[in-house]
Image (spheres, rainbow, N blue to C red):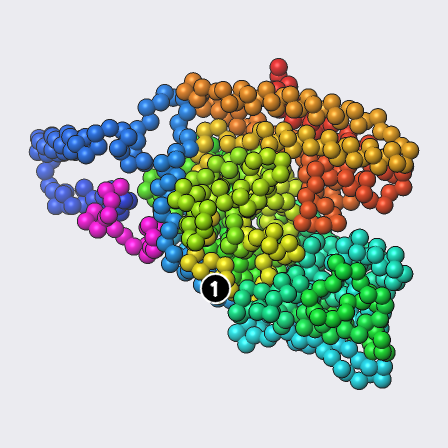
Amino acid sequence: MPSKGRYTAGKQVSRYEADSENIDIEYKNLEGQGHSVWCSNCTCPLGDKKPLVIKALTVTVVFGIGLVIGFLLRKTVYSSNEDLPIYEKPNTSSIYSIKQDYDREFSKLIQDDLEDVYNYEDHMKIITRCVHMSGVGSANKLLDYVEQKWKTFPFDAVKVKKYNVTLSYANYTNMNANLVTVQTANGSLIFHSQYNTSSSHPEYLPFSAYSPSGKVTTNNVVYGHYGRPEDLQVLVENNVDIKDALLIIRYGRIHPASKVKNAERYGAAAVILYSDPADYANNQSTVYPESWWLPGWAVQLAHVRYNLLGDPSTPDYSSITGIHHKSEVKSHFPKIPVQPVRYEDARFLLSDMAGPIVKNEWFGGLNLTYRLGPGYTDDRKVVLQVENMIQERLISNILAVVKGHYESDKYVIIGSHIDSWIQGGVDSGTGYTVIQELARTFAYHIGKGWRPRRTIIFALWDASKYGNIGAYEWVQEHERQLVAGAVAYINLDALIQGNYSFAAGASPLLHSMIFNATQTVQLNCTNTAWCTKESTVYSKWVRSFPDPQNDKPRFKSLGDDSDHAPFAYRIGVPVLFPQYTFNETKYPFLSTYPAIGALEDTKDYVENFIDPNYILHITMTKVLADVILRLSDSAILPFDLQSFIDFVENGKNVLSEMMTVLASMGKTLDSTELCTKAIDRFTNAATNFKYKMNNIDITQFSEFDLYILNNKLIQLTRAFISEVGLPGNKHYRNILLAPDPLDLKKEITFPGIYWSVHSNYNSTEMIEHLNEQISLIVLSLNRATDILNDAMVT
């Protein structure tokens, strides 16, 4: 059983060794020993019961006296119920009243058990020891380690879920397979790309996962900035032909897969990705290892899948062992080869280019004149060679389950991923470190007698770097149970990626809950003028990222490419995606921490440049502990109906933009008014429901009433899930919010309407799609209204 602070798994504790009278004690099993010890040589007849009766009476009297003495002693120590240990407070409520509710005192007890720096350091050391690439050696060893460790905890179950999935690897049999070279007109080699090899990690090899193999030789090289649609349109406007070109594109602003997809749409032959120092080194002269900025020798890795729907070969169902795999999976992958290079290589590739000079905002930090192309001022040719392998591999998720006492069919899920293509100090080390501490301390209190009202599940996902495959497969496998009972999913991905402030993306229903949780944790104030002993995580958050619409903090977009995606966009489960992050105002071009996807993302990177004493890890873990308790223990689910109402009302802005576009085409849409009225009906129903919920007398509320109320709250977001899916992206089923297919980092309201307007449909097709999407939204709004009003039975 885990103990407070550092623990020794499996150590037995006697009453004399215990540091608390509430500690669990292992007693010997005495069943069946009475006869063998007392009567093994007994020859007295069965009718002679007098000695036994006397003994029985003696034992009873002694036992009774002991109970009385124990009661009197305990009454002396604890003069009232308020003084009793939290696990032993009597439940004085009747059978029909509330049995368990969120307890701030208990939350603080758990938070106080999360301050041992050595634990965090130990977890980080374990996760960053190797490169944990899914489906191969070191990742599998780490999974085995976690399984055995969690089985020493008093969880109700520790499960390993295996899936047979399609993954992508570089060709390790040919270390020079993925290469960019430059030749003169007569074929002489004048340049070849390089990367920082690691004798400690020979499994590290730069590649873009799911890029097809191929070889492209061309002098038609074009600079494509960030590869956004508006960037490629600039090339067209400057008469730079993208067709059959090799596009050199910077990381940043949008997802790498979106860049490649845009290039492919314009007919490009191949893509080279690089990290410009203007974005990932802030044009600084001091880089890693002296600072956290990306050095010129680093290569960032990413996948370039177009559709993130779990295992590519089983997109419509879970890929458990033995399930049929579709033979044609490449429709989800690029059709053109893609390769990342270091920015020292990009400097050579972008030097001496021909064509017009780019506009100012297209300049980077490579200390050269950036030109659009095509080609070079001489006759050189660039050769891109990619050799990647597509293989079926077995991956594993690990889940630890703590069954709820009163609502065991309702689930609060906390997940982090275990895989990385590098050592992954930030990604996946910070999330793994925090979830391990959460598991340890909750297990400790479970062992002491506490049990949550609702079931808590700690999950470690595999194959997250390939497009959140592990999480997606688990959600598909257990979809029906999760639709019915999942309360929320908390996503711990690249959790501590800066030291400026707490920040979060969250579904609207969770907004006020995370506001309240961040107010329970004090900041560690050092050398900050405004920070006082009363300053909280919340106070720093609202100062750092204020919402221009109100006096609360601003929430970030959730985006798609992390393990929350199947929960939010497939089955409609509310999601929280917290992070400690950097100053976005100071570094406006930095989309994430500089070393993401690079071999430099190590334990030392975290400890030297982000969180030297694990203070931010401790702070985040305390916030999350309170979040978990609010979601798992609160009698009435702490859902923010007002934020949800405001979010739905924002859909009217999407309708207004749609009508403006249609008006410019000389078109109108009668169904728009129908949708507006449906929004109004929902708003009225939700407002009334919120008022009634806020005025409930909890002392007069029974567990039966509570279950009905909470079930309505859980089913509210499910009302917006459509089995039809969204146009062109049927794996997105949430018609209220979903990622922008042109930018997986961006989230939009009423995505079906948005996509229909911004896709390349002719006017007739657009009207058809819009009518269908508006109809689905109206039906969903009506469904949500009916859930709140009990319209089926009243």
Q: Residues within 10 Å of mark 1 (few under 14, many from 20)?
A: some
The residue furthest front is 529
| Above/below status of 289 relative to 38 | below
Q: Which residues are magenta?
A: 1-22
Q: For the point 64% across and 21% down, which residue is it?
A: 684
Q: Nearer the viewer, residue 709 or 353?
A: 353
Q: For the point 53% across and 55% down, which residue is it?
A: 498
| Above/below status of 23 relative to 496 | above
Residue type at mark 1 is Asn
Left or right of 710? Residue 700 is left
The residue furthest top is 794
Q: Is residue 469 visible?
A: no
Return the x and y of residue 566 as percentages of the image width and height. Answer: 63, 45
Q: Is residue 410 visible?
A: yes
Return the x and y of residue 794 as percentages of the image width and height. Answer: 62, 14
Return the x and y of residue 234 as percentages of the image width and height. Answer: 83, 56
Magenta span dominant secondary structure: loop
Return the x and y of residue 208 as percentages of the image width and height. Answer: 69, 64
- As for residue 7 lying within the magenta part, the answer is yes
| Above/below status of 361 relative to 90 | below
Q: Nearer the viewer, residue 710 or 283?
A: 283
- As for residue 519 lying within the magenta part, the answer is no
Residue under label 1: 608
Left or right of 374? Residue 168 is left
Q: For the point 61% across and 51% down, which residue is it?
A: 585
| Above/below status of 330 relative to 40 | below
Secondary structure found at label 1: helix
